[in-house]
Amino acid sequence: MLQDQTFLRIPGPTPIPPSVQHAMSQPMIGHRGSEAKELIQRIRPRLKTIFGTEQDVLMIAGSGTAGLEAAVVNSAMPDDEVLVIVTGAFGDRFKKICQSYQLNTHVIDVPWGEAVNPDKVAAYLNQHPNIKVVFSTFCETSTGVLNPIQDIAKVVHQTSDALLVVDGVSCIGGVECKMDEWGVDVLVTGSQKALMLPAGLTFVAASDRALNKMKENPQPRFYLNLNTYHDKLTDYSTPYTPALSLLFGLEQVLTLIEEEGFDKVVERHEMMKNMTRAACRALHLPLLTTDQDASPTVTAVQPNDVDPENLRSIVKQEFGLSLAGGQQHLKGKIFRIGHMGYSSPADVLQTISLLEIGLHKAGKQVEFGTGVAAAQAIYTQLQK
């Protein structure tokens, strides 16, 4: 392994394009000057396509979890009953945030590795008509599950007056999202996943219905008060110090996405998912999720004849290849391959090739090239 050569294939942070790194190295500017306003003015309309909304997308200096907390504290009033759909560690995080604000928190627990059934959500809402907000993850990073947000939104609005708040941190920018058309009321993402930036920015968009509730909400909040961000954005500014270097990079990210075409970005992520899953099957590596539930941005693998932690250690030491492990009760039982953002089919082929060697060194019977060939077959089929 060469010094300083690494292959980052985890579900965040993800690799950063060289042109984005270059953009972030620009000289600093005054964050209250005309140059900063012009930067925000250029960025402001271009985020809407990725979210699938005509609403403003708020830009907050903070991690994805800051965005999740902002979504909770702004959308739920102190006495509200709320429902959290837990399909993994980050659904569980939504639950913990709600509980920390002492909200009356209902939970639908879904086995990890499965997506939620929208009918189950509808039934629960019919049984609990006082629920005011429903929280769900879009892509559950810890399991590689993509929840059917369009269907969830439909049943939420058919069976209740609740707001639907969605954690899209590990998929927005890599999957189709139609926030307005689907009826998502609040959508959150972070910078360090499919948006190809370092951690440090969180983005929140809210429907008119959600914004109206936020204005009436007496819940105490200061830095995470989304009303303040919304008001300031109309003047192309932020209420508090913006992460300007990340905004420089974001402008270039949006340029890269627009040059590729967002539909093509979505197709690329779907292809990488299919290539990775085909390779794992060819290598007799059980997958944690079904094809129907699988996310285009991260694949969770549950091997039954090799230690995932040993495998991760081998490929890290041999090649500088970083794969993610499991979280909570899946720790030591799965490994996860990130394929989002600045990632291509060529990266998938390289990852599978290195994974085959790692499996061999970990003691698994592997016919070299089997996984790569399966991934190549998917690539060539989809290119026709």
Image: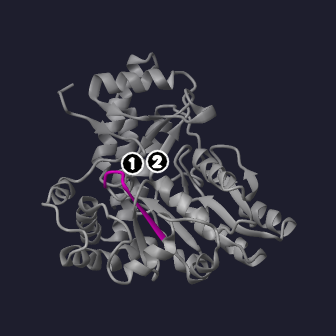
Q: What residue type is labelled 1?
A: His
Q: Identify which residue is drawn at 45% across, 78% down.
A: 230
Examine the structure image and report whether residue 200 is included in the region drawn in magenta.
yes
Which label belongs to residue 3?
none
Q: Which of marks 1 and 2 is nearer the N terminus?
A: 2
Magenta region, residue range = 197-204
Q: Identify which residue is drawn at 71% across, 71% down.
A: 156
Give residue 239's position: percent from left, percent from top. Answer: 38, 71
For numbered disc 2, what is the local secondary structure? Answer: strand
Report, in whole angstroms, how far the alpha carbon at label 1 lies from the one at label 2: 6 Å
**Contact (Cβ within 8 Å) of mark 1 with mark 2:** yes
Residue picked out by circle 1: 339
For numbered disc 1, what is the local secondary structure? Answer: loop
Farthest right residue in view: 127
Give residue 280's position: percent from left, percent from top. Answer: 47, 37
Horizontal relation, residue 234 to residue 179: left or right: left
Residue picked out by circle 2: 298
Q: Does 312 sit above or below residue 277?
A: above
- Label 1 environment density (alpha carbons within 10 Å; few <14, some 14–19, many ≥20): many
Q: Does 292 sit above or below residue 260?
A: above
Give residue 383's position: percent from left, percent from top. Answer: 33, 59
Q: Nearer the viewer, residue 14 or 25?
A: 25
